[in-house]
Image: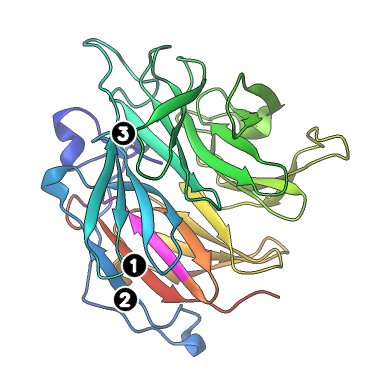
């Protein structure tokens, strides 16, 4: 996750300011990569979004039938993108009071989103206020409702749902904490903390997925992929560093049942394939249409990649690409 500041928000991001760098991406039409080149094949645009309307996708979850639900980071909106590329706003969250300042990002921020089997959406909202910051729920045909408050001085960013237990896991990028709570709502508990999760200047714990009995978490500043085992009683085991050298890493998802994963490297305008041994290679770039990828989701043999265009300021979009399943 990354955030543009005040008026410069449209063209540059806080991450660029924090790292004293900007990114220029060269974007082409639909890319066609080959497996022989080490790139993902069959790259296609699912949707081109409207930057003038604030349609910068921060996080993505998939719908049955090929659609996707996304959070628009700074317009406070949750939207559904149909397979033919149309975006429909499902909900707009209330604005915080004047003078509210979201930690690290200034403006109100919509982060992670997940979908349960019954179509209920859960997502994170950060405003710097205790009245609005927390986990929100949107049932089909309903209105958004906050189901859990989170600390106003944090930045709830990544969100994961453990379908086996019905528990939600929240990665707080400012406090370097993983929170846990029931999907039904209630008071969150501090599930995991530690230096591996803390920021090193800007944002720490960011993307999160539950996979093979563990929470897998990225640290944007430190460029790491971390694995935190779920103990037999549901607690957090020791933090393991599974990959390094991925500074500006945002979200991740697994390519199948194994531990191979795809990682969105936001500022670098790349998607990396990270192998179980921690090595990685770049499989998508700006030449494929990426514009500061923020999140991704894999279903079957297809990866869906959302780009927020936080630095490029050009074409926020959603791409799809073929991915080899890791069995």
**In the image, what residue occupies the spot 41% across and 27% down?**
145
Q: Which residue is mark 1?
A: 319
Q: Which portion, as a residue range, is magenta?
A: 303-312
Say which element carries label 1.
strand
Dot 3 alpha-carbon crowd within 10 angstroms: few under 14, some 14 to 19, many 20 or more:
many
Q: Is residue 109 above or below residue 159?
A: above
Q: Nearer the viewer, mark 3 or mark 2?
A: 2
Q: Quadrant of the C terminus?
A: bottom right
**In the image, what residue occupies the spot 21% across and 76% down?**
29
Q: Is residue 61 above or below residue 169?
A: below
Dot 2 alpha-carbon crowd within 10 angstroms: few under 14, some 14 to 19, many 20 or more:
some
Q: Are marks 1 and 2 in contact (CB under 8 Å)?
A: yes
Q: Which mark is residue 14?
A: 3
Whether residue 82 appears in magenta in the rendering, the answer is no
**For marks 3 and 2 on the same chain, the one whose residue lies earlier in the sequence:** 3
Q: Which residue is mark 2?
A: 44
Q: Is residue 257 visible?
A: yes
**For marks 1 and 2 on the same chain, the one whose residue lies earlier in the sequence:** 2
The scheme the figure's colours follow is rainbow
Real-space CA distance between mark 1 and mark 3, rounded to the nearest whole angstrom: 24 Å
Q: Residue furthest front?
A: 141
**In the image, what residue occupies the spot 71% across and 64% down?**
276
């Amino acid at each position: 996750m990354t955030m543009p500041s005040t008026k410069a928000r449209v063209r540059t991001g806080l991450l660029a300011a924090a790292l004293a760098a900007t990114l220029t991406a060269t974007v082409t039409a639909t890319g066609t990569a080959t497996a022989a080149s080490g790139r993902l094949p069959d790259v296609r645009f699912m949707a081109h979004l409207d930057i003038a309307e604030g349609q910068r996708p921060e996080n993505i979850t998939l719908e049955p039938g090929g659609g996707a639900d996304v959070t628009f980071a700074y317009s406070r909106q949750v939207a559904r993108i149909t397979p033919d590329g149309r975006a429909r706003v499902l909900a707009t969250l209330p604005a915080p009071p004047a003078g509210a300042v979201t930690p690290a990002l200034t403006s109100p921020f919509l982060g992670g989103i997940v979908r349960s089997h019954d179509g209920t959406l859960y997502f994170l909202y950060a405003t710097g206020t205790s009245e609005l910051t927390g986990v929100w729920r949107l049932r089909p045909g309903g209105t958004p409702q906050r189901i859990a408050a989170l600390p106003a001085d944090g930045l709830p960013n990544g969100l994961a749902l453990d379908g086996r237990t019905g528990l939600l896991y929240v990665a707080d990028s400012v406090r370097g904490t993983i929170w846990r709570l029931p999907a039904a709502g209630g008071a969150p508990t501090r599930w995991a903390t530690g230096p591996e999760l803390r920021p090193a200047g800007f944002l720490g714990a960011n993307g999160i997925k539950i996979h093979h009995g563990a929470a897998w978490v990225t640290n944007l500043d430190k460029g790491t992929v971390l694995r935190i085992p779920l103990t037999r009683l549901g607690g957090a085991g020791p933090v393991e560093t599974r990959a390094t050298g991925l500074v500006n890493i945002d979200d991740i998802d697994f390519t199948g049942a194994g531990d191979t994963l795809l990682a969105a490297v936001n500022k670098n305008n790349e998607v990396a394939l990270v192998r179980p041994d921690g090595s990685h290679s770049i499989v998508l770039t700006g030449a494929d249409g990426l514009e500061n990828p923020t999140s991704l989701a894999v279903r079957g043999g297809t990866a869906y990649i959302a780009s927020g265009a936080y630095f490029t300021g050009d074409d926020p979009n959603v791409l799809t690409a073929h991915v080899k399943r890791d069995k």
